[in-house]
Amino acid sequence: MTPVTSTERERVRADLVRARSARSAREGLIKGILVLAALLSIATTTAIVFTLLQQTLSFFGTVSPWDYFTGTKWTPLLAGDQQSFGVLPLLWGTFYLTGIGLLVAIPCGLLAAIYLSEFAKPRVRKAVKPILELLAGMPTIIFGYFALTFVTPTILRGLLGIPVKQFNGLSAGLVLGILVIPTIASVSEDAMRSVPSSLREGAYGLGAGRLQVALRVVFPAALSGIVAALILGASRAVGETVIILIAGGQEPSMTLNPTQSFQSMASFIAATARGDIPQNTLKYETIFVVGFTLFCVTLLLNGVSAKVVGRFRQVYE
Amino acid sequence: MTIKKGLISIATALVLAAGVSACGGSSGSTSAESLSGSIRVDGSSTVFPFAQAAAESFNQDQANVKIAVGESGTGGGFAKFCAGETDISDASREIKPEEAALCKKNGITYQSVQVANDGIAIAANPALGVDCLTTAQLKQIWNKGSSINSLSQIDPKLSTTKLSLFGPGTDSGTFDFFTEKVNGEKGATREKYAASEDDNTLVTGVEGDKGGFGYFGYSYAAAAGDKITIVGVNNGKGCIKPSVATVQDGSYAPLSRPLFMYVSEKAISRPEVKAFLAKTTDGSVSIAGSAKLVPVTDAQLAAAKTQLATAEKNAK
């Protein structure tokens, strides 16, 4: 062991400083990249809103917002006096089909969540949950053809004998529900599982049964997460395009009869953008106006969801 | 590891070499001059199968020419064509004045070449039991403000089943053509019917609903076979059903129409575009057959060749 000289000590110190500054440069670079990635998503959203707004404002320069939001006839692609820009049939189609979907998805999704979180053995849960989530990752065009070529002819007409049209809201709505089940089940299950087990144990200690614990203790405790799951599911259904495009018909209507054809906002956009509308015309702008409306509806749903989550959240320490 | 990698790369190289030599062999043996470059085609979805078949046939001889065929519809195709984005525009109608004005504004000059014929078929679900309708009856069903819900409303002898109507999207050439010929005013239509740009969707609808009734391209109706009934049209000269012969000679009136390829005179100065159009026009009869369209007659072919010659002469 030779004593450390002061020059050696200084050299070591200098090395350390150099290493540190190299590291901080590297970290700065990484941080920069991360910030850039975050900004990119913000920039994209801003650009989308800007594009939508530009065409929307131009559209409202010709059509009055009052006519748009209160009109009950949606025939923007027709010529002359037949042209009408009442968006209500599209809003109706969107919410009506979402409603049918949620009627299926909420009970199925919640029951599945309760089962997975409170009743299933860990081994079963481990096997079932990924399968459930696989369903969520399935391309929706498959669901669309499932609705058109199986649900409509085999289930609705064959098994149940309902005289539905070839393209009908019932089939599209039901399959929309199936699409949303995994979202609702998976997110609610996460919420219920994150309820501390001390609550369950307390309830068991008071002599509660398993079902009582699930329904009266865990479910209310996880309510904020569950409501968020439902809104997330609804949001997904509202924006869903392909299923309704393929199986729901492309006929804007405001009927309560689910055997008829419907058109939703998203499916109108897809159908119309696929067609051969001349650009920079009023017809072309309808795509953007409906897109903007859809954007606002989804934004509203997400906002409500954030509010709800904040309001019902119970913090356990 | 490295040995394995080496083997793989050798194998890949061999496969590639085999592929290249095979391609080279076939293109070299059939054509004296090997062309390259790319051709952009877009437009009518009715002409789309024709353009695609033409591209495939051309690529058998000229494998190095890339041909991109789109189907934005006639209107969408012209929008791109007149913006100078495409070389050839497929059309199921003639160019509209406003589209022509856009082309002129952008300095795009062009010629139209008739490549095939198409008929619009009136299709009904077999359960409706309808065999023939007059143009006036069709107008009753489809005209602006129509509230016809069953065929018995236009003829008491016909079915009382509630109709489920299907028609093409409002910006397709088929829609323009049908409304002009049947309803007497381009774009005038009843509002309550299911509209789709996808002809297969329309076939599915007519086939799937007991009251299914609609109109779309003859090629799609013919391909559907027995699952739908093709209804004859009586335009004052008796009931005529669409067929190759009746569409070609126009006796299936008023619902047969010519199909075009519009070519820009600037594009035709490129050898690959010139060769593609020459071959497509020469072979249009067999291409139309494979694309399930109705081929041109001799007279129509001669006219097409004249147009093409004019375009080549004006090429710049």
Image: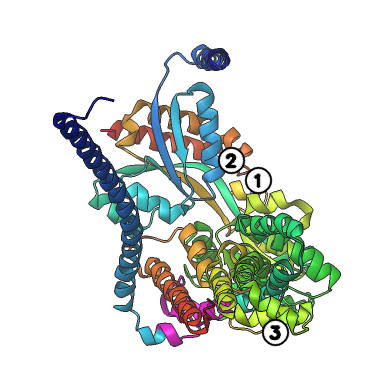
Are tags 3 and 1 found on a single chain? Answer: no
Residue identifier under label 3: A216
- Give the chain letter at badge 3: A
Q: In front here: B66 or A90?
A: A90
**Is A212 located above or below residue B109 in the figure?**
below
Q: Do the residues labelled 2 and 1 touch (CB within 8 Å)?
A: yes
Q: Which mark is residue B295?
A: 2
**Is B180 located above or below residue B283 in the figure?**
below
- Give the chain letter at badge 2: B
Q: In front here: A238 or A92?
A: A238
Count of numbered circles in the view? 3
| Mark 3: secondary structure | helix
Which kind of residue does numbered mark 2 sit on? Pro
Instruction: Confirm whether the magenta stretch covers residue A148.
Output: no
With A213 as the anchor, is A251 left or right in this view?
A: left
> Dot 1: within a 10 Å radius of its alpha carbon, few (fewer than 14), some, or many (20 or more) residues?
many
Which kind of residue does numbered mark 1 sit on? Val
Q: Which mark is residue A87?
A: none
- Magenta range is A68-96
Q: Where is residue A69 in the image (x, y as percent from the top left)?
A: 43, 84
With A175 as the anchor, is A305 left or right in this view?
A: left
Quadrant in which residue A98 is drawn: bottom right
Q: Do the residues labelled 2 and 3 touch (CB within 8 Å)?
A: no
Residue identifier under label 1: B244
* Nearer the camera: disc 3 or disc 1: 3
